[in-house]
Amino acid sequence: MEIKRNSQIKTTYTKDLFGLMPDGEEVYSYELTNKNGMKLRVITYGATVTELKMPLKSGEIVDVVLGFDTLESYIQSFSLVSPPYMGATVGRYAGRIHNSTFSLNGKKILLNKNNNDNSLHGGITGFSQKIWTVKEVQSGKESVITLSYTSPAEEENYPGELTVELTYTLSEENELIIQYSAKTTEDTVVNLTHHSYFNLDGHLSSVTDQELIVNTRQMLETTSENIPTGRFLEIENTDFDFFTPKKCPSKIDNTFALDKKDEFAASLFNKNNNLKMTVYTDQPGVHIYVGGNCFNAVKGKENADYHSLSGICFETQNFPDAPNHEHFPSAVLKKGEKYSHNTIYKFQSF
């Protein structure tokens, strides 16, 4: 996926102190705006998207992602039985790794367990809870912020020091473009994703009547613990067939295999305000998630009581547990090579 960027951009943006970590480290928020009035707010804690505001044809503004008003709420959410990873950057490995183990170069790696016996979304303290460094911010026709995080070797027991760069871009076409790159000091595994809960009707509403399309007829078969078996399921004419528009399901936690190159991965449409979001990615899968069981434990933005249908996640990524399945796309990043991942969330107001 080639993404072209206008190099003639003014370097203006808004930066505010968002809060202090328990050890006193400062967390900042950055607000970027494109020429159409689309606004993105990112905090350095977890490289997390806290707001994404879309101007509608009616002149209204709608905030299409869930989030919290305070740093304390984001931190507190990770102590819940099932953390929501609200708007966060997930790594080193998105999804589950079975029994928290995999083999690499003939060596067995034992990761920290945080989901029964499995490792989920990078382990006990993944990238979602780290303070990222802002490398560059630009604002103009397109608005851009680049953040980085260096994960020490053996963090959560992953081999190699991994240096990650993440760029969020608001394009002139009202796209949120997310680009990841990473390099390592020794062979390791990497699978990064974005974990916003989207709601095109605003974060105080429900996604129940919004129409979902997933542009594939295949998904991964999983066990009762949501671990891939290695098999691909044909889903045409089943409850998981979203090839044609269907209302958002009340509960889903599944990875869909994307086999259509240069086509969209998924889309969401809200007939209440005629807003559409289309997801594009160069990754082999999109994990669709609705139905979190942790909501209401922490108040959302504007004192909202989030519920299980408050939002839907489109986690573009490699397959969960890929290091344990030779026929899955490889998640290995070798020393001297570069990890690359590009995803676009494109918004259209009709």
Image (tube, rainbow, N blue to C red):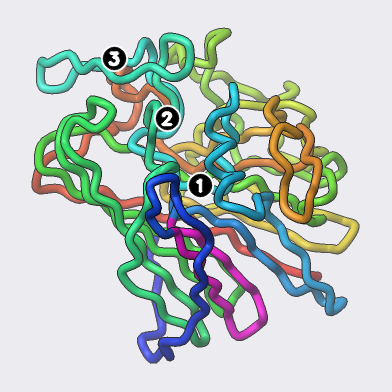
First in sequence: mark 3 vs mark 2: 3
In space, the residues marked 3 and 2 are separated at their CA atoms by 15 Å
Q: Which mark is residue 118?
A: none
In the figure, 142 relative to 299: above or below?
below
Q: Secondary structure at mark 2?
A: loop
Q: Amino acid at mark 3?
A: Thr
Q: Quadrant of residue 38?
A: bottom right
Q: For residue 7: magenta?
A: no
Q: Amino acid at mark 2?
A: Phe
Q: Are marks 1 and 2 in contact (CB under 8 Å)?
A: no
Which residue extends farthest right?
272
Looking at the picture, how far across and down is residue 266, in whole percent?
62, 46
In space, the residues marked 1 and 2 are separated at their CA atoms by 19 Å
Quarter containing the N terminus: bottom left
Q: Which mark is residue 319?
A: 2
First in sequence: mark 3 vs mark 1: 1
Magenta span: 27-44
Q: Secondary structure at mark 3?
A: strand
Q: Amino acid at mark 1?
A: Ala
Q: Which mark is residue 88?
A: 1
Reading the image, the residue beneath label 3 is 101
Between circles 1 and 2, the one closer to the viewer is 1
